[in-house]
Structure formats: C-alpha cells, structure tokens
Image (cartoon, rainbow, N blue to C red):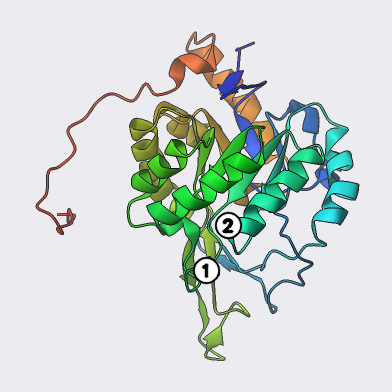
Amino acid sequence: MTDLSVTIGSLRLANPVMPASGTFSEALADAIDLDRLGALVAKTVMPEIRQGNALPRVAETPMGMLNSIGIPCKGPEAFIRDAIPAFKRFHPPFVASISAGTVTAFAHLARQVGEGGADVVEANISCPNLEADGHAFAVSAAATAHVTKALRAATDGPLWVKLSPNAPNIAEVALAAEAEGADAVVVANTILGMAIDIDHRRAKLGAGMGGLSGPAIKPIVLRMAYQCARALRIPVIGCGGIASAEDALEFLIAGCRAVQVGTATFRHPGAMIHILDDLDTWCRARGIERIDDLIGTLEPFEAPRLPPGEDLAAE
C-alpha cells in the first residue's frame, strides 16, 4: 500500500483526508470507520448557546449547495463535556473548530477547548468581527494578525486558522496568520452567495444569503490554495469542492499538505473513505510509494502580468 501519511506542523497524520467542520459528527461512525481518517474535525463551537439562523437553512444548487446554518451550538461547556470525549474514542487527532465575535472571546475559547482535550484548535475567523462593524476577521490582514496573535498566546497546541475566500487577497491574509504563529491555514471557507425562489419571489434561504460549497467553488479555492502554498512556509490545508481522489490530488499537487471534505459527505456518507481508497489505487498504479512525494509538484508556469486593477478576460 501507498504511504499516505503527511505532517502538519508537529502532527503526523495517517493520511491527508479529513472532514470539513460543520459536515461531520461522531454519528458518522455508523457509516464509516472513523479511525481511517487523517483527523476528525468537529462542528464549530462558539462562546455562547446559539439557536442558529431562520429556516430554511440549506438550498441545493446545480453544482453544490448554499447553507446559512448560523452555527447553532450548546456552548463550550457542553462541547467539552460531551463532544470531546465522544471524538477522543477514536485514534485520529481531534480538531476543535472555534469561532467568536471578538478577539478576547476567541482567545478564551481557544484556551477552554485546548485545556478540555482538543488536539488541535482550528479558528474559523470567517465570522463577523463585532469590533469592526461586522466585517469578518479573515478579510483583513490586520484583523487576522490581531486575532491570531491572541489565539497563539492562549494555546500552546497546534493552531490552524481557517480563512475566507471572500478576502480580496487571501495570500496576504494567510501571511499575516503565519507571522503571528499559526501552525497551518485552512483554505478556505464557503463563498458568499444566494438563490431565489422565482415563483414566490423570495430568497431560498431564511437568512437571504449563505455560503456556497461543493464542486462549483473548487477551481476558485484551488487557485487560492495554490497562491497560499506558494507564499507560506507553514502547511496549507485545502477545503472546497473536494469530492474525489482526483480533486484531492489537485490540491496536493498545488502544494496543500492535506484536504478537508464537506459537501460530498452529505451526498455520500462514505465519500472520504472512497477518496482514501482511490488515492492509494491511483498512486500504486503509477508506482508512487509516498503521497508526500506528490505535494507541491505542480510544474511551474508563467502567470499573466497585468496592469494594476485589470483582470484577465477569457477570449
């Protein structure tokens, strides 16, 4: 079999495949062997008890889905009491995804879940920053640096920072996270979008807009992941539209050290296991003994040089 193991900072994972936050729970153990995954990433927890957004919260699109869940949760105490022990029954490292509306709340929550037993803290900084008129931390390099510095001071364990694809320059934001002590970045969260019910002339989501995920966003996020991997010294974890081994391989070849699978699991609970099996099959067919040998092997190309403010138009 192919050696699928990878390193993310100080962590060595059995393989590069893990779930994306919000798309996975320990109940999936009834469908797949969770011990086969590289890591286990829980649904995001926030500092307060939350009911979530108005219904409906999910709308299917031709190439993916929109969601506006609103991160319902029972709070950190329940998470530490119930969720962490449930996940720690399994062998892969447990990643606690956290989010908060202020820097202070982020730091406090990181300390709580770290002391509560999480192996990794994944900080979802795509949420609104209540101290900056609701603008997400991850759309600003300065805000990202501020919150990452506080998070780093709050935990000695591995710290992953999950970025937003809505940032105007995601590599710049990723560099800010790296400079303040992040051990890895996750690229990226969902892309803001919407859908309309034309018969009733209303938004298909109760909150109006939501996050687009699935195959539709893969080329966009793949480009962002490549840009971040090329700019950073710390590992990049790719997340966005990954539904097959071929998708995962694109991200690995672009320079990511691991991938997260989200929407595909909703369509097929065994998606991550199929990706793992197919990665092994693909590598063995080509005589590749270690998946690590593929990471960052994209052939160099000359990117178009454009005047400031101009975009490359398809012709």
The answer to which of 293 and 137 lies nearer the viewer is: 137
Residue labelled with disc 1 = 131
Residue 3 coordinates in the image, percent (x, y): 61, 12
The answer to which of 4 and 173 lies nearer the viewer is: 173
Which quarter of the rendering shows the C terminus?
Answer: bottom left
Please give left or right for residue 97 compared with residue 238 in the image: right
- The answer to whether residue 233 is above or below residue 223 is above
Discs 2, 1 touching: Cβ within 8 Å: yes
Residue 46 coordinates in the image, percent (x, y): 71, 59
Marks 2 and 1 sit apart, C-alpha to C-alpha, by 8 Å
Which quarter of the rendering shows the N terminus?
Answer: top right
Residue type of the residue flagged with mark 2: Val
Please give left or right for residue 276 compared with residue 241 in the image: right
Residue type of the residue flagged with mark 1: Glu
Q: Which mark is residue 256?
A: none
Residue 187 coordinates in the image, percent (x, y): 48, 44
Q: Which mark is residue 103?
A: 2
The answer to which of 67 and 265 lies nearer the viewer is: 67
Residue in the picture at 79% in, 33% down: 34
Q: Secondary structure at mark 1?
A: loop
- The crowd level at tag 1 (other Cα within 10 Å; few <14, some 14-19, many 20+) is few
